Image (cartoon, helix red, strand yellow):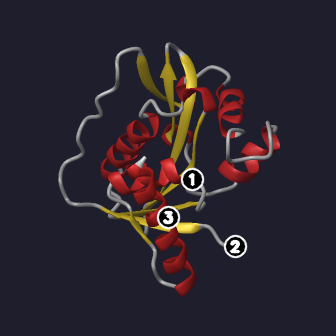
Amino acid sequence: MPQLKMYWKNDGKAAAEVAVPSGCRIVSFTELDDAMDKWLDIVQYGLSNGKQDAEFYRKVMTANATYSEDRCFFVLENERAVATLAVLCDYEKKEGYIHMVACREDSRGKGYGTLLNRVAEYSLKKEGMQTAFLTTDDWRIPAIKSYLRAGFTPDLSTDDFKARWEKIYANIAEQRKI
């Protein structure tokens, strides 16, 4: 089953500085010691089959011509890397791609996805991107909710996508009742 796709459009407003919670910092891959190990540790929580190696990083990140380690961001909570997201930029198309969004299981529910979405929007605007997209899976409901709050809209271009989004929205509505 193909991943779902979501789209973002630049609203033309200036990039807003990102407020970071007390005890946290946002750093890029290039600013973090042992960044690859920390990235591999985080993405094993939902984006890979267990902890992978450097070849996995090369395959899913550096093999992409639009990837830059300066735009691979980490949330540090009390200096511990707990979440990550990469913003890939195609300067010719002025289109961004939000890639490999992940959070350690023991750090979920703290708003780090929302924080990283703000970092992504800031980066996209600063880099002059007019649009962006991301891909996700149906079962990643907390992530999907944060993408919707960040202004991403679902791709409804096929009957399959429409049906899957109907189920997701029903799931979200059901969660609100609890």
Discs 2, 1 touching: Cβ within 8 Å: no
Distance, label 2 to label 1, CA atoms, is 15 Å
Please give the residue where the numbered disc 3 appears in the rendered image. Answer: 168
Left or right, residue 55 beside residue 71:
right
Discs 3, 1 touching: Cβ within 8 Å: no
Please give the residue where the numbered disc 1 appears in the rendered image. Answer: 140
Identify residue type, mark 3.
Ile
Left or right, residue 65 beside residue 54:
left
Sequence-first tag of 3 and 2 = 2
Distance, label 3 to label 1, CA atoms, is 10 Å
Sequence-first tag of 2 and 1 = 2
Instruction: Find residue 82 and report its horizontal and vertical position in percent.
Output: 56, 27
Identify residue type, mark 1.
Arg
Please give the residue where the numbered disc 2 appears in the rendered image. Answer: 1
Sequence-first tag of 3 and 1 = 1
Q: At 54% across and 73% down in the image, what residue appears?
A: 164
Q: Looking at the rendering, in which quadrant would you find the N terminus?
A: bottom right
